[in-house]
Amino acid sequence: AGVGALDGTVVRKAVIAAAEARTGRDVEIESLQIQPFALAPRVRVSGVRIANADWAQAEHLATLAAADVAVSLPHLLLGRLVLPHVRLEAPHAYLERDRDGRGNWSFDDDQEPSDAPRTLPAVRSVSVQD
């Protein structure tokens, strides 16, 4: 961890719980570190795995060796999530369909439909390293 890095154990557990609630799948994150002292604080996660649907052949829907995400603090203070840079290391997705044509990436089988709009963060740049 770099100077000023914080152990993100509490945040990691909250992120895992939220992801599992949203997807209905087991989610693993081996580590999460936060470097908060900058105009663009950084978050690094490593060892990310999302379990696959019960019927799928692959063990995981997706794996990610690591990700570094910068967050714009000025935008965040204004209530907007802006990510100046996202760097992904070894991202892999194992997409499958069952006999009925259902994709293993569909998580809404047991969820109530919602008319609430989904807002995505603004991402300025993305780099991928395999």
Image (tube, rainbow, N blue to C red):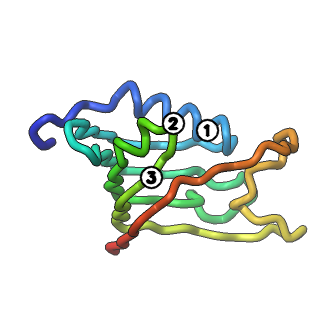
Front position in the image: 7 or 116 = 116
Say which amino acid is labelled 1: Glu
Say which amino acid is labelled 2: Ile
Any mark on residue 16, and which? Answer: 2
Residue 77, given in percent of the width and then of the height, sits at: 42, 36
Residue 14, given in percent of the width and then of the height, sits at: 49, 29
Residue at label 1?
A: 20
- The structure residue drawn at horizontal position 56% and vertical position 57%, both measured from the top left corner, is 60
User: How busy is the neighbourhood of tag 1: few (under 14 within 10 Å), some, or many (20 plus)?
Assistant: some
Q: Measured along the vertical axis of the image, is residue 103 above or below residue 44?
A: below
Residue lying at the far left of the rendered structure? 3
Mark 2–mark 3 Cα distance, whole angstroms, equals 21 Å
Q: Earlier in the sequence, mark 3 or mark 1?
A: 1
Residue at label 3?
A: 82
Q: Earlier in the sequence, mark 2 or mark 3?
A: 2
Residues tagged 1 and 2 counted as in contact (Cβ below 8 A): yes
Q: For the C terminus, give its image quadrant.
A: bottom left
Mark 1–mark 2 Cα distance, whole angstroms, equals 6 Å
